[in-house]
């Protein structure tokens, strides 16, 4: 088990140069807050025609449709779609179960959050890094623009692995302190004894573009244990006495695969994009290959 | 099985703590190493699944405990050096000679001596070490290699158990020669050949009651002989050792049966003899036979042409095979004799005695009949049993026995040379049936020839110059040749050449000749044989096919041998055998009896003369303690390896 605080930077210069060429892709069209590069449902100033309305005194005469006046002898105003920004949230599970593995799962999650956040910042999207916490008020900073990269990385680095809040409560608190819709990437190991179903159902109900990156370390995927042990749960301190044996290891693998399959199936039924990530796989591969394949980046 | 205590009491106390400590260590709370994991969520699910098989879980934990306790138990048992009393089998090759002769059917050992011998042989086989080889030879009057050298104990046991008793007498010579031959000549064969395996030194174990004479002329090279006598001491047994019948020669004619009993016990025995004539009891007598002595008895019976006699001795004793004897009297068959002579009154008169007339029909013929084609045909067809040629020779030898008086057979095998001066008899074979009971004293011969008989001849009269009378076989027949004539011719006058016709031995000689050469010897002589011996039926008695019916009722065809006689070889059963012609009528009977004083003497021998040494019998081989603690230690090592494997490979039931 390695410590959560890693001296290694979250994003290497090489990774940054690759990420600059990417952009986040949303499967849905969301309403933004500021003018950005994304199409919005709101009518505004852009080159994309949206609709007509009757002219009323005070409207800008430049948007009158003279062809229509010539035909109908009435004055109509052309309406255009507004270009607004995309909201991107990275929701990081900072429970103690994430502070495990080589590479460390929490550090890995921070790296993924930083990489995706950087892609959004480069495209002038609105980025907010959040941690699953028991607090309804403490939220991460809102970030825009490339210049916010450092601030984003600092914030991520400062997130400790100590808040053992159940997933459902963490997601509920997140929704209470945050508003808006956009892309949300949940970075978690889903190892919640009260289950992940409630949390994911809440996220799916928000009609956001939800992605779940299920992070597990190689030690969890292929445990190398032997002998008579008492396993101590990192989050709740519960003990499980085991005598490691070949049958037990087989049953663990069976339980693990059932867990993974269950999460995948649950997400698929709710329109949530699910990705299982082994921390042994480089972050760059996750972003440029796996997430690209799932349509989150291009 | 016994054990030897190799540790002191306090050492046993310390050793006893070991299994207790192992037991306690397993059931004290296991000290588990704590390991921090991100979550026990998945582990709990896996362990819950495992808890379904609770019993197997307990067994899994207990398996290593069980194995370790078992290892300690094995070691403790090995320290006790368990063992048992075995026999000293320090060699690696053994030859088991098992006596299955008639005396081994004695019941002084339950159920029989042979059974006891087989049991002891089986016990020896059970104590063979891995790599030891043994062979088994069963012997009575012949040796039979029951099983050649093998190290397979199961094969040896199977063949030993199959050894069956016989009613034959004992002749250990063949068996000792076979055993000696197998152990001789080491190095003469390739080392890896099976024969080489069988020619290495070996220990000879003789399981017998020793009822055979000393055998000192068989070298036991490479054999260490040991004699294990079978049978109890002080066994009482009376046996019939002789039984025969004959017609009394004088008037009134009657039948006589002779028997002789032998008491091999240490006390006088009173027995009852019952004589059955043609299965009807005709006489009973009570006799007391002194200990260690023989006693004879003679039964008088009315004369019969043919008779079947059975002598039964009661009460039963340890050996039943010698409590009965059989004898037969066959209908005498008259021989067909042809006398070819130019004329010799003494010869003709001697052949006309009552005794000869009882045996044969004598036909007289002159020498010119030899050129008669009809006679030649008759002679060639076996119309005669005996042809006597007095100073004459046939054109072709007849299909009959012949007696030449002063002439040679018409074959190239016989020759003679004249003797200068009167031949002087110096020796007469009085054992041969032709010349038995002959007193040739005062017999003078004027002239004669010394015979040059063919190979295989028997010389009956010897003179200073050589044989004067000899008999030789010829293709199933016999030719007897007298080197001097009874008469000679001087100046055309017949004069006696010898005074023999005037001696009492002359008619006896002719009687013997008719009886022996005429085929009558098969009638009265050799009507009783020993078990296993062959019985020969004259070729003149009948033509094929002949059938022999054994006392047990089985029927076998018998055929001619090389000499033209019928040979009956299946003579193991005691009793009366019948030889039947094709139409079922009985041609001959003969009896098979044990009649052996050595077999009836049931006192086990204490020592035997085998080869150059006297081998003293031992009741059992030297006792030696046999231990198996090595196997226990090996078992403990195997269990240790199994325990290591289970522990390291996480193998559980």
Image: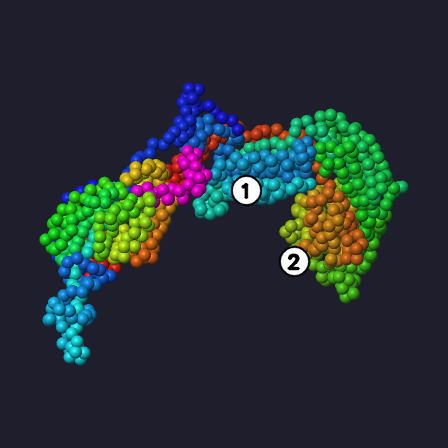
The spot of residue B117 in percent (x, y) is 61, 35
**Could you tell whether B614 is left or right of B243 in the image?**
left
- Label 2 and label 1: CA atoms lie apart by 61 Å
Image coordinates for residue B312, horizontal then vertical, percent: 79, 37
Vertical placement of residue B317 versus B411, above or below: above
**Is A266 inside the magenta-drawn segment?**
no
Residue B163 in view of the camera: yes
Q: Residue furthest right?
A: B252
Give the residue number, with chain letter if any, for mark 1.
Answer: B154
Q: Quadrant of the C terminus of chain B?
A: top left
B361 left or right of B30? right
Q: Closest to the observer: B21 or B44?
A: B44
Q: Read off the chain for label 2.
A: B
Label 2: element kind: loop
The earlier-in-sequence mark between 2 and 1 is: 1
The quadrant holding residue B154 is top right
The reply to whether callout 2 and callout 1 are in contact (CB within 8 Å) is: no
When asked about the image quadrant of residue B292, the answer is top right
Identify the residue at the far front of this view. Answer: A57
Q: Which residue is mark 2?
A: B412
Of residues B197 and A167, the one nearer the viewer is A167
Farthest residue in the bottom direction?
A71
In this picture, is B207 found above or below B553? above
List x then y, in percent, for residue A25: 21, 60
**Residue A216, numbered circle:** none
* Magenta span: B39-66
**Vertical side of B342 occupied by A98: above or below:** above
**What secondary structure is found at the residue carrying circle 1?**
helix
Kindly identify the residue that appears in the image at 14 percent across and 60 percent down: A35
């Amino acid at each position: 088990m390695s410590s959560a605080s890693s001296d290694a930077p979250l994003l290497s210069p090489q990774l940054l140069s690759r990420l600059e060429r990417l952009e986040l892709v949303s499967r849905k069209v969301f309403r933004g807050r500021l003018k950005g590069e994304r199409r919005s449902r709101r009518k505004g100033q852009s080159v994309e025609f949206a609709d007509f309305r009757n002219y009323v005194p005070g409207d800008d005469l430049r948007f009158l449709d003279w062809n229509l006046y010539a035909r109908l002898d009435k004055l109509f105003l052309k309406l255009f779609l507004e270009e607004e920004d995309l909201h991107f949230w990275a929701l990081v599970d900072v429970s103690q179960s994430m502070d495990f593995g080589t590479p460390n799962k929490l550090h890995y999650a921070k790296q993924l959050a930083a990489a995706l956040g950087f892609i959004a910042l480069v495209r002038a999207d609105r980025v907010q890094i959040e941690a699953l916490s028991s607090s309804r008020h403490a939220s991460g900073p809102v970030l825009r623009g490339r210049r916010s990269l450092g601030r984003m990385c600092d914030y991520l680095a400062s997130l400790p692995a100590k808040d053992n809040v159940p997933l459902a409560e963490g997601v509920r608190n997140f929704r209470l302190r945050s508003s808006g819709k956009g892309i949300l990437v949940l970075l978690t190991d889903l190892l919640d004894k009260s289950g992940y179903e409630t949390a994911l159902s809440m996220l799916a109900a928000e009609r956001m573009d939800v992605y779940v990156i299920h992070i597990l370390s190689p030690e969890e995927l292929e445990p190398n244990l032997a002998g008579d042990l008492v396993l101590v749960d990192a989050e709740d301190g519960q003990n499980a006495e085991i005598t490691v044996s070949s049958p037990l290891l087989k049953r663990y693998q069976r339980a693990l695969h059932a867990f993974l399959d269950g999460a995948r199936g649950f997400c698929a039924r709710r329109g949530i994009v699910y990705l299982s990530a082994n921390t042994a796989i480089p972050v760059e591969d996750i972003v440029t290959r796996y997430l690209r394949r799932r349509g989150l980046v291009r | 099985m016994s054990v030897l205590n190799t540790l002191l009491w306090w050492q046993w106390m310390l050793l006893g703590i070991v299994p207790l400590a192992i037991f306690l260590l397993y059931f004290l709370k296991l000290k588990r190493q704590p390991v921090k994991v991100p979550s026990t969520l998945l582990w709990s699910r896996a362990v819950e699944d495992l808890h379904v098989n609770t019993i197997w879980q307990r067994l899994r934990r207990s398996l290593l405990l069980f194995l370790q306790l078992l290892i300690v138990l094995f070691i403790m048992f090995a320290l006790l050096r368990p063992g048992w009393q075995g026999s000293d089998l320090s060699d690696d090759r053994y030859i088991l000679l098992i006596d299955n002769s008639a005396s081994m059917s004695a019941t002084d050992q339950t159920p029989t001596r042979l059974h006891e011998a087989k049991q002891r042989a089986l016990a020896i086989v059970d104590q063979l070490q891995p790599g030891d080889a043994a062979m088994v030879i069963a012997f009575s009057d012949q040796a039979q290699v029951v099983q050649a050298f093998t190290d397979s104990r199961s094969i040896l046991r199977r063949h030993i158990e199959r050894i069956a008793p016989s009613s034959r007498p004992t002749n250990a010579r063949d068996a000792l020669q076979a055993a000696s031959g197998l152990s001789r000549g080491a190095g003469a064969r390739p080392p890896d050949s099976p024969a080489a395996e069988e020619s290495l030194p070996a220990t000879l174990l003789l399981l017998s009651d020793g009822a055979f004479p000393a055998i000192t002329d068989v070298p036991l090279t490479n054999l260490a002989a040991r004699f294990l006598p079978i049978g109890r001491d002080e066994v009482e047994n009376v046996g019939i050792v002789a039984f025969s019948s004959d017609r009394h020669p004088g008037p009134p004619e009657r039948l006589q049966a002779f028997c002789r009993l032998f008491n091999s016990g240490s006390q006088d025995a009173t027995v009852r003899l019952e004589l059955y004539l043609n299965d009807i009891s005709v006489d009973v007598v009570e006799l007391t036979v002194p200990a260690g002595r023989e006693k004879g008895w003679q039964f008088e019976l009315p004369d019969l042409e043919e008779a079947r006699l059975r002598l039964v001795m009661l009460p039963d004793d340890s050996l039943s095979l010698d409590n009965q004897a059989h004898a037969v009297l066959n209908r005498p068959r008259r021989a067909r004799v042809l006398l070819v002579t130019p004329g010799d009154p003494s010869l003709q008169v001697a052949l006309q005695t009552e005794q000869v007339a009882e045996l044969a029909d004598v036909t007289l013929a002159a020498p010119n009949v030899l050129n008669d084609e009809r006679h030649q045909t008759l002679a060639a067809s076996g119309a005669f049993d005996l042809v006597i040629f007095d100073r004459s020779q046939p054109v072709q030898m007849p299909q009959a026995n012949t007696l030449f008086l002063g002439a040679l057979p018409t074959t190239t095998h016989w020759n003679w040379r004249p003797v200068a001066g009167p031949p002087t008899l110096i020796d007469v074979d009085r054992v041969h049936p032709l010349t038995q009971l002959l007193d040739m004293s005062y017999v003078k011969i004027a002239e004669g020839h010394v015979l040059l008989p063919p190979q295989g001849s028997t010389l009956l009269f010897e003179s200073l110059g050589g044989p004067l009378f000899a008999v030789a076989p010829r293709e199933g027949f016999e030719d007897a040749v007298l080197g001097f004539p009874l008469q000679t011719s001087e100046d055309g006058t017949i004069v006696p050449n010898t005074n023999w016709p005037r001696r009492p031995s002359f008619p006896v000689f002719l009687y013997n000749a008719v009886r022996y050469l005429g085929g009558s010897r098969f009638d009265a002589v050799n009507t009783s044989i020993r078990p296993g011996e062959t019985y020969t039926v004259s070729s003149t008695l009948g033509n094929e096919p002949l059938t022999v019916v054994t006392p047990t009722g089985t029927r076998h065809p018998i055929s001619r041998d090389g000499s033209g006689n019928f040979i009956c070889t299946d003579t193991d059963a005691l009793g009366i055998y019948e030889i039947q012609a094709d139409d079922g009528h009985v041609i001959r009977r003969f009896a098979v009896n044990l009649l052996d004083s050595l077999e009836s003497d049931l006192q086990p021998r204490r020592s035997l003369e085998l080869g150059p040494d006297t081998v003293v019998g031992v009741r059992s081989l030297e006792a030696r303690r046999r231990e198996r603690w090595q196997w226990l230690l090996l078992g403990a090592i195997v269990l240790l390896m199994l325990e290591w494997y289970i522990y390291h490979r996480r193998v559980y039931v």
